[in-house]
Image (spheres, rainbow, N blue to C red):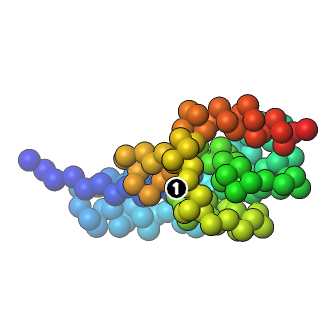
Amino acid sequence: MMVRFKLSIKTQFCDLEIEGDSTSEILEALRGLDRGFLEEAKEILSSIMEASIDEDLKSIVETRHDGPLIVTKKDLSHYEAIGIVLYCSKDHQATSRQIKDRLTASGKKVTVPARLNEMVRKGLVFKPEERGSFYKLSTKGLKWMEEEVIPRLRR
């Protein structure tokens, strides 16, 4: 039986898998990826993400290659700010660190871990079992965003 090697790399935009019959094949494939390819892929994916966000959210959120940026001038609770970041993130999920980074970039000061724990207790977010450090909007959280938060921010 022949052993096959597989390297999986998770990025914010995609999962990259490289397979080979030896570790040297894996390294050779990695060396074949240049910065230009990765930058171009990031740009293309970023533009796809921007197009996928509802036009009505443009006054609330701006999509960047590193994630959503809150641009609304309206007051937001800490829960709402976290909810917006999760709502606009891939699969409605992100790590506590990613949420904090996006809120900081948006000029929002939020104690993210404490608020996330409270949001878990309220049933707005949960931690998917297969993704330990990630938080994801629950069905209740998605409904809350779509029926209460986003309509209020659109007015």
Query: Quarter of the image containing the C terminus?
Result: top right
The answer to which quarter of the image holds residue 154 is top right
Give the vertical position of 138 relative to 102 (above or below). above
Give the vertical position of 112 relative to 41 (above or below). below
Q: Give the residue drawn at x 75%, y 65%.
A: 108
Q: Which residue is mark 1?
A: 117
Q: Give the residue drawn at x 28%, y 67%.
A: 24
- Residue 111, given in percent of the width and then of the height, sits at 62, 66
For this rendering, which residue is in front, 143 or 58?
A: 143
Instruction: Report the residue that reaches farthest toward the left.
Output: 1
Query: How many numbered dots are placed on residues in this image?
Result: 1
- Residue 104, given in percent of the width and then of the height, sits at 70, 68
Judge whether residue 119 can be spotted in this image. Answer: yes
For this rendering, which residue is in front, 110 or 39?
A: 110
Give the vertical position of 21 relative to 51 (above or below). below
- Residue 39, given in percent of the width and then of the height, sits at 63, 61
- Report crowding for label 1: few under 14, some 14 to 19, many 20 or more residues within 10 A (C-alpha): some
Q: Give the residue drawn at x 87%, y 52%.
A: 74
81 lies left or right of 154 = left
23 lies left or right of 109 = left
Q: Give the residue drawn at x 78%, y 50%.
A: 61
The answer to which quarter of the image holds residue 69 is bottom right
- Three-letter amino acid code of the residue under disc 1: Asn
The answer to which quarter of the image holds residue 141 is top right
Judge whether residue 51 can be spotted in this image. Answer: no
- Residue 62, given in percent of the width and then of the height, sits at 79, 52
Element under disc 1: helix
